[in-house]
Image: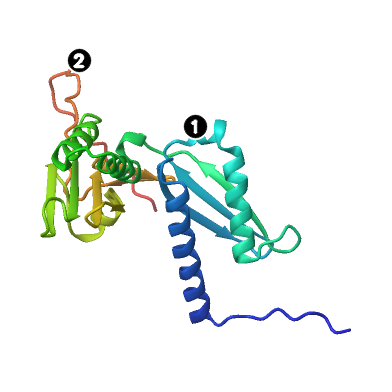
Amino acid sequence: MSEKRVKRLNTKKKFVADGVFNAELNGFLAKVLGMEGYAGIEIRATSVSTEIRIRVAKHDELKEKGARRVREIKSLIEKRYNFNDEDNKVELTMRPLEYDRALCSAANAENLKYKLLTGTPVRMAVNNIMGGVMRRNAVGVEIMVSGKVRGQRAKAQKYAAGYQISTGQPKKEFIDVAVRHVNMRAGVLGVKVKIMMSVERKVGNQTLVMPDYIRIHDPKDDNNDIVPGVQFAQKREEQH
């Protein structure tokens, strides 16, 4: 019998398939791990296995009490995308955040969603979230709530504190964004949380710094004894 031939996708279809896989998986995990502060995924695929790293704000709580939930999520992903333990294995790992979870936009968006669902007034809930973020020495925070907040007319309300950049590459590197939908009686509210944590951020081995940030160093101690006089440079010997 001839060997089973592996069907290869062309480059364009592969990029589209990867994008659809990432989007579907991101939406599914945001739904099932919303209360744990789901903050994104990182996928590393090889010819033998696929590793999915999930970043959650409440990593320690999920590690202690949610081992069964993690196994259930892994089983659902295997059934949906035809993974198996033989030639197409999937590994699911939960990772903690690299920064303070009080500065995670996803965790704060879920917290705000829970407050709105329990009947807390919008302004009070938003001010509570913004106060918690700014107390952790964040540079800036912006929260946008849109929909039928009050009455029959939909509108968008924007609340901001601190300083945020809004254009260019630094916007992608320094601002953490999360969007959630809140199913209220009158309709669906949209919640968007943007947090700028600091002007310096460590990504892997390199440190990213805001282009307009100027660091002023402390002056050096002037304890060195300076000997008055003129020092002449020694003349180099000419090489023949």
* Residue annotated with mark 1: 61
The x, y position of residue 192, in whole percent, is 24, 52
Pointer 1 with pointer 2, Cβ within 8 A: no
Residue pushed farthest right?
Answer: 1
The x, y position of residue 38, in whole percent, is 42, 46
Does 93 sit left or right of 231 as displayed?
right
Q: Secondary structure at mark 2?
A: loop
Q: Earlier in the sequence, mark 1 or mark 2?
A: 1
156 in relation to 206, above or below: below
* Residue annotated with mark 2: 223
At x 48% / y 81%, what residue is drawn? 12
Residue 147, quarter of picture: bottom left
Q: Alpha-carbon neighbours of circle 2 within 10 Å: few (<14), some, or many (≥20)?
A: few
The x, y position of residue 54, in whole percent, is 50, 48
The x, y position of residue 237, in whole percent, is 34, 44
Residue 186, quarter of picture: bottom left
At x 13% / y 44%, what residue is drawn? 160
Q: Quadrant of the N terminus?
A: bottom right
140 in relation to 44, above or below: above
Residue 113, quarter of picture: top left
Does 189 sit left or right of 156 as displayed?
right
Amino acid type at circle 1 is Glu
Q: Alpha-carbon neighbours of circle 1 within 10 Å: few (<14), some, or many (≥20)?
A: few
Q: Secondary structure at mark 1?
A: helix
Instruction: Quote the CA–CA distance across marks 1 and 2.
Output: 53 Å
Amino acid type at circle 2 is Asn
